Amino acid sequence: MSADDENRFRPKPGRIGSDTPRTGKVQSFFTKAKKIARQHSAAPSRSSPRPGKSPAAKGGKGARSTKGPGVRRGRGAAFVRSRTLSGGWHHSALGMRRAVVKTRYVQNAGRNGKAAAHLRYIQRDGTSRNGERGQLYSATEGRADGDAFLERGKEDRHQFRFIVSPEDGADLTDLTAHTRDLMSRIEADLGTKLDWVAVNHYNTGHPHVHVIVRGKNDLGENLVINGDYLANGIRERASELATLELGPVTEIEQTRKLSAEIDQDRFTRIDRAMTEEADGRFLDLRHEPADHKRQFNRALRLHRLAKLEKMGLATEHAPGVWELSERMEPALRELAERGDIIRSMHKALKADGLERDPMTFQIHDVAPETPIVGRVVDKYLSVELGENLTVVVDGIDGRTHHVAGIDPARVEDARIGSVIEIGPADTASRPSDRTIAAVAEDGIYRPSRHLEQAKFEGRVPGGDYEGYVDAHVRRLEALRRAGIVERIDADQWRIPEDFESRAAAYDAGRNRQASFRILSAFDLEKQIGADGATWLDRRLVSGDASDLASAGFGQQVRDAVERRQEHHIDQGDATRQRNGRIFYRRNLLATLREREVARVGAEMAASKAMSFRAVAGGEIISGKFTGTVQLSSGKFAMVEQAHEFTLVPWRPVIDRQLGREVMGIVQGGSVSWQLGRNRGIEM
């Protein structure tokens, strides 16, 4: 390099008054002003995704989503920014009334039936102040039409669900008015009218309200709500309204509330404060200031730490120096959840006039390993913002069982008092898997070979051979995606030697829900005098009482069986010998079932202006499936043809054929349904 190159100076002029080089395009003041205005506006900018193209925030447990600018902004963003500029959220400030708000975002709720199921269960019995069914209301209606709300939202992309629980909700004059004021403020924050319905619940220690909001704004566009607003904005408004009505929390009230938390078996505000103050889980309380408030807080912490020490969740290494267990928060939250479950079980049993020893309570986190038989004491939403149900069962084994996460469609016919069986998840291999394994030759399954064999045997219901084989191919395609089978070409599939067991394990992994079966939709008292074949009769015929405990529901079943025996003797269906043995008429269950079906059929014929026809074993039935009826002998399907109808045993597969023509063969108290083309094949 030459001396001239070393000393060469090349000036690069920048903006006047700027100490840094230009790094990009200069923005005018007007451009900056427009950008700031857009940021403080609830309306989406031109650069934001169009309505319906950006997912809304999922508000579960206040979680903040960052999926795109539509969620980071969204409606309510201006309110969030105003709070940020004014020093943060006010609901945690001194004197503010606390409120707990849970939010959830549910996709396609109107299309998959989730909205109807959720609406049905938040209106269930026992949730109102007087213990009756919950009443649905809206912004303008004291008795809102739930069906009309579902109809309006059946095509919505999503819906929002809120649970609002003011800490001092029991002191509010009118929870309904409080909810309407809250929703009015939310509408103002979001800049749009909302279509919503709500139900007040008084079935817990804290009155709370369930709110369901359609996922559309007042222009019919998809409603996108800012994630921070879902997490904190609704809580802020609820806290403001409670404080406005009841006044700020006084120092005496705050002292009383905190003191009440010392002995609670849950993660309290005191625990949260100590966790935040701790340095690497160590808390030093030796050098607190002498002012009254700090000394009171120190006393609270010391009393709470003494409680935690007994629970094995805190350790005092020196006077005033404590170590908090890393298990403290999860252990306390788990303990609180278990306590809530036990209280719910106690309340359900008490409502049914029952008393059970808490030592007999059994809480199942997963599907039970052995079947549970008993009476339904209660059923409610496992998660109040979800759809799956929890069932409380008073078992014949003398225990009271709590089983969560059950599909509501499976327990729809189970009422309080119904006798059910809950067992492990179904891991049996499918009939289609057994067929594939049998047809495969040298580990290769050929659809063309299967089609030839099916036509030769001629056993396919309805004669739809192509559809029958296609159903097996669809099953293989699902298993291929799971890595169980391999597709060689259009007519060859490689099947492993352990195909059936691996396919069954695949199904078990996808379906972790407990199996569920209704043994009788009627309670014991109704079964005792029924004219049909009841669950008690099936136990009488089997003669096995080894699974009945001598206490609780087991003893009640023993007593009911004896009373059912006396009923049969009075009706002439059984006789008692001199030695005390009881003999029942031949084919007792079939006789009772036919007798009940004939009686109910005659009663229905009188109201339907149609003739009833009973069917015999081996008979082929056909007609339109028009509905079901629940009898003490079980659930029956009603099939109509011309000017007559018949009642035949129901199976789940027929539900998809409601309103359609069906055909089947009656075989030994059941029906083998033959579903032809376009009606699907049970796999």
Image (tube, grey):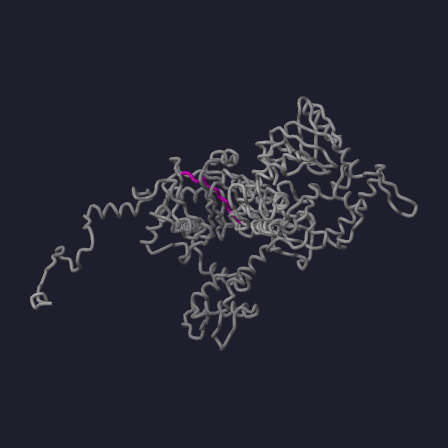
**Measuring 50% from the left and 76% from the top, which residue is drawn there?**
317
Closer to the camera in the image, 351 or 146:
146
Please determine whether, in this image, residue 591 is positioned above or below residue 178.
above
**Residue extent of the magenta highlight:** 207-216
Closer to the camera in the image, 515 or 185:
515
Could you tell me if residue 405 is visible in this image? no
Q: Is residue 219 left or right of residue 476?
A: left
**Measuring 32% from the left and 44% from the top, which residue is drawn there?**
48
Q: Is residue 16 left or right of residue 558?
A: left
Q: Main secondary structure of the magenta part?
A: strand
| Residue 499 part of the magenta-drawn span | no
Could you tell me if residue 554 is visible in this image? yes
Query: Where does the image place residue 398, in percent across and percent down from the top left?
Result: 72, 55
Please determine whether, in this image, residue 346 is positioned above or below residue 331.
above
Closer to the camera in the image, 641 or 134:
641
- Image quadrant containing the C terminus: top right
